Amino acid sequence: MAARIHAEQGPQEERAEVRESEAVLAATLSARAAAEAAQAQRAAEYTAAEAERAQREADEARKAAEERLLRGIPPDMRPTPEQMQEFRARHGYAKHALNIAFTGESGVGKSALLNALRGMWPEEEGAAAVGVNKTTAVVEGYTDARHPHIKWYDVPGANTPTISGWMYFMDQSLYIFDVLVIVFSDRFSQTAGTLLHNAQRCGIPAFLVRTKADYLVRRIKRDRRNQRLDDARARAILRAETQDMVNDNLAKLNLPTQRVYLVSEDGMRDWVVDRDSSSTIDEPAIFEILVTAQPGKDPNQG
């Protein structure tokens, strides 16, 4: 009898041990699952917190940038080496030439001035397109038979329906060029100041050129006709008023003062083709500075 009872207890004890082992395993698996779930929850919360922090920082940066723009402070633009290489290839950057780009707002006369610097008329083959309905749509490069060491670039104007204002410097890849000629006509806008600011940040020599000087001189003489100004006096007034206007705006942008060159399309062409200075103001000066510059050397340094 005792032997039979003992024999029956053996399997019962084994089954109890199995059940206990299964319960322990189930508890272990449940605990592991709970731990993994908790870890996943913490990871999700961390990811959500990081996303929220990143969004908050982005919002703060955007707000700060907007506030800077409202105060007239342009944003800093810094291209990557990959961007430099990509866009130099795209725009046909000439490695062994001086690559000079004409930039500024739409309608200030960049294309016309570029043609005049090359001694060309708008209707000639190879000239940059000019006119009310012939604005530059993409960056165009032009060689110069008179100065084969230079490649000129005509850049689309800023502040048009397709070209934004303060993103203009990066949108048009202006950081790839050796020299920038920042062109304006009537007023020195924030766009011009932003271009100068970012050119300096990228170490690119930049010149300020006010076009349509012949028209502006005539306007001064007309507006002050009671003073009976001659051309020389009207030009002197234009120079002083232009420099004062630009200096005031550069001060607002915390930029140093810089000379402004006064030019006209006809005056530049007369000088380039015939060395006729009868209608020039600063055309000979800016022309000689640009065409005698050397790649890798700042033309501002002589």
Image (spheres, rainbow, N blue to C red):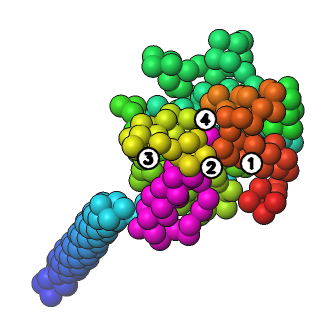
Residue hosting label 2 = 261
Real-space Cα separation, disc 4 to disc 1, in angstroms? 13 Å
> In terms of secondary structure, where does tag 1 sit?
helix
Which label's residue is closer to the chain start, 3 or 2?
3
Residue hosting label 1 = 285
Q: Which residues are magenta?
A: 236-263
* Disc 1 to disc 2: CB gap under 8 Å: yes
Residue hosting label 4 = 264
> In terms of secondary structure, where does tag 3 sit?
helix
Q: What residue is shown at x 81% (from left), y 33% (from top)?
A: 275
Q: Please name which of the two marks, 3 or 4, marks the residue nearer to the observer.
A: 3
Looking at numbered disc 1 in the image, what kind of residue is underneath it? Ala
> Badge 1 local density, few (<14 within 10 Å), some, or many (20+)?
few
Looking at numbered disc 4 in the image, what kind of residue is underneath it? Ser
Real-space Cα separation, disc 1 to disc 2, in angstroms? 8 Å
Whole-percent x and y of residue 89?
Answer: 71, 36
Residue 21, compared with residue 102, is above or below; it is below
> In terms of secondary structure, where does tag 4 sit?
loop
On residue 58, the disc is none
* Disc 4 to disc 2: CB gap under 8 Å: no
Which label's residue is closer to the chain start, 4 or 1?
4
Residue 49, compared with residue 177, is above or below; it is below
Residue hosting label 3 = 227
Q: Nearer the viewer, residue 274 or 87?
A: 274
Q: Does 236 sit left or right of 92 as displayed? A: left
Would residue 246 be counted in the magenta stretch?
yes
Q: Does 133 sit left or right of 233 as displayed? A: left
Looking at numbered disc 3 in the image, what kind of residue is underneath it? Gln
Quadrant of res 258: bottom right
Real-space Cα separation, disc 3 to disc 2, in angstroms? 25 Å
Whole-percent x and y of residue 212?
Answer: 54, 35
Residue 252, compared with residue 2, is above or below; it is above
